[in-house]
Amino acid sequence: NGNYVGNYSGWTKGEDKTMGFYNKYILPKIINAGCGTKPIRKQREKVLPLCKGIVLEIGCGSGLNFSFYEENNIDKLYALEPDKEMLRQAESVVKEVNFPITFLETGAEKIPLEDDSIDTALLTYTLCTIPDPLAALLEIRRVLKKGGKLVFCEHGMAPENNVKKMQNFINSFWPIFVGGCNLNRDIPSLIKDAGFLVDNLETMYLPKTPKWFGYNYWGSAS
């Protein structure tokens, strides 16, 4: 999973109490560990400097991206995150950055911002988890100014058939344990389906990462 801890409904009511404990105390630690590996930090280093002006970060999680922004390029950051525990962790690191941050405790499918109000929208390891990624991308498009940029770095569907088969199999149970993360989403297609023009796209398997989890897309769209 990325930064966005989605609500997964695949558990029965009898398991709510157990999963509540897991989601509050265990899952955030798993996500921070998984999203804090060296290969993923390197990916963050590639895309965060592309963010400028008034920025909307979708799925800020525990604030893992905050230290990678070029502070002189950021006028303001809106940090959106639906999970209370992750948001609490993110709020604790605000003092470490030198630009204003406003937290939005909500999902990305309905962003509480005005039309044409954002210069840059950022997605890092987030589209995998959002319950309705197309709705979220349409909302991002709505709030972006004319000439604004969508900057993204995501994991998703691999190009090799044998890896795809493995992703599809693991994805039958993976989202239950990792906050709703999906391994097999076609990230470029989702972005294009929302009406964006992909300006730059790079891909690779992350080193020292299982192929079924490590196929990355990154770049920008307008």
Image (cartoon, grey):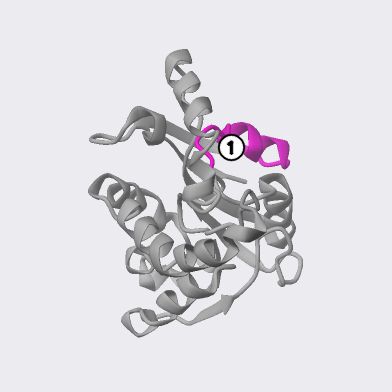
Q: How many marks?
A: 1
Q: Residue at x 29, y 52 (%)?
A: 41
Residue 37 coordinates in the image, percent (x, y)? 26, 50
Q: Residue at x 68, y 61 (%)?
A: 145
Residue 102 coordinates in the image, percent (x, y)? 55, 80
Residue range in magenta is: 182-197
Up the image or down, 207 lies above or below 158; here it is below
Depth check, front residue: 23 or 184:
23
Depth check, front residue: 96 or 186:
186
Tell me, yes or no, if residue 60 can be seen here. Answer: no
Q: Residue at x 47, y 43 (%)?
A: 154
Depth check, front residue: 107 or 8:
8
Q: Residue furthest top?
A: 161
Q: Residue furthest front?
A: 14
Classify mark 1: residues with Cα within 10 Å, few (<14), some (14-19) or many (20+): some
Which residue corresponds to mark 1? 198
Depth check, front residue: 120 or 3:
3
Residue 70 coordinates in the image, percent (x, y)? 36, 66
* The quarter of the displayed image where residue 187 is located: top right
Left or right position of 13 against 38? right
Left or right position of 179 against 147? left
Please check the rendered image and state whether residue 169 is part of the magenta-colored stretch, yes or no.
Answer: no
Badge 1 element: strand
Residue type pointed to by label 1? Val
Q: Residue furthest bottom?
A: 95
